[in-house]
Amino acid sequence: MNRLAGKVALITGAGRGIGAAIALAFAREGAAVVLAELDIETARGTAARIAEQTGSPRVLAVHTDVTQRASLQQAVSKAEEAFGPVDVLVNNAGINVFRDPLTMTDDDWRRCFAVDLDGVWNGCRAVLPGMVERGAGSIVNIASTHSFKIIPGCFPYPVAKHGVIGLTRALGIEYAARNVRVNAIAPGYIETQLTLDWWNEQADPVAAKQATLDLQPMKRIGKPEEVAMTAVFLASDEAPFINASCITVDGGRSALYHD
C-alpha cells in the first residue's frame, strides 16, 4: 500500500470518473494528491471522501481550467506550496465531442482540441521544467482506444486522441535522458458517468447497454479502478524502463478483428 509513498501527484479532471479513481488509488498508495478540476465543488467533495477513506491529510482540490496554461501553472504552484515538487502528473481531463465532419462548427473543433490535446500539453509544460531540473518524474496521459481505432460518428475526438499519443511519444523521447518518463493509457469502454449518461440518452437504455456489453470479449466493460491501478504502476518506481509507451485497458476489444 506504499507504492507511491513520498510522491506528490497532480491529477487533472479528478472530480469524478477515472480521474477520481486515480486520485483515490494514488492516495491509498501513499501519494499526496492534488485534484485539479474545473468543477471545484465536485473536486472538493471527492477530495473529502478520499481523505476520509484513506485517512490521509495530504489531499487538495484546486480549481483548474486545463485549456488555460496559466491555470495549470497555478495548480502546480499550489501543489508545490502544499506538498512539495510534483513527481507525477496525470493528464486525465477530457471531453467528448462527436460531430459530423461537414456540419461541425469551428467552435466544436476548437473546444475538442482545447481540452483533449492542448490541455494535455498545458499540463506537461507546467511540470516538465521542474522534473527535468530534478532529473526525475512520471507523466501519465489518459488517451483512449479512439487514439488508434475509429468509430464513425465520433469526429473530431479521435483526431485529438491520436495527437495525445504523438505528444506522449515525442515528449517521452525528448526527456528520456533526463529520467522523465511520459506514457499513456488507452481505456476502452469504462463504466463512468459519461457512459451511463450515453446509455440513458438512448431510446432503449437497457438494450443500448446490452449492445455495448455484447461487443466486449469479456462481456463486460471496465471499471475506473482498473484504469487507476494501471496509472499507479506507470507512476511508480516499478516501471522505470517503460517510456513513450501506451498501455491499452479495454478487455481485448481493440484486438478483435471483427464481430
Image (spheres, rainbow, N blue to C red):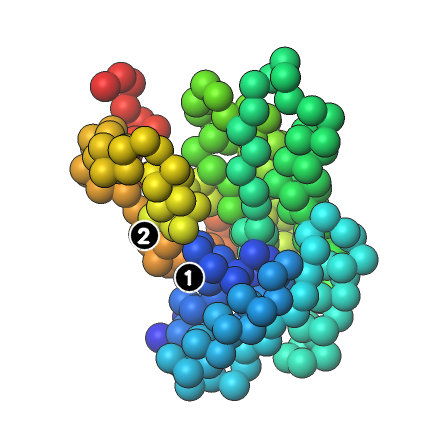
| The C terminus sits in image quarter | top left
SS for tag 2?
loop
Residue in the image at 53% along x and 29% along y: 98
SS for tag 1?
helix
Q: Which residue is mark 2?
A: 223
Q: Earlier in the sequence, mark 2 or mark 1?
A: 1
Q: Amino acid at mark 2?
A: Lys
Residue 240 locus on image (x, y percent): 49, 56
Does 227 sit above or below residue 248?
below
Q: Which residue is mark 1?
A: 21
Residue 10 locus on image (x, y percent): 60, 64
Q: Residues within 10 Å of mark 2 (few under 14, many from 20)?
A: some
| The N terminus sits in image quarter | bottom left
Does 250 sit above or below residue 66?
above
Q: Amino acid at mark 1?
A: Ala
Residue 156 locus on image (x, y percent): 59, 26
Q: Is residue 247 visible?
A: no
Q: Are marks 2 and 1 in contact (CB under 8 Å)?
A: yes
Residue in the image at 64% along x and 22% along y: 104
**Quick check: 21 left or right of 98?**
left
Q: CA distance from mark 2 to mark 1?
A: 9 Å
* Front one among 65 and 26: 65
Q: Is residue 58 visible?
A: yes
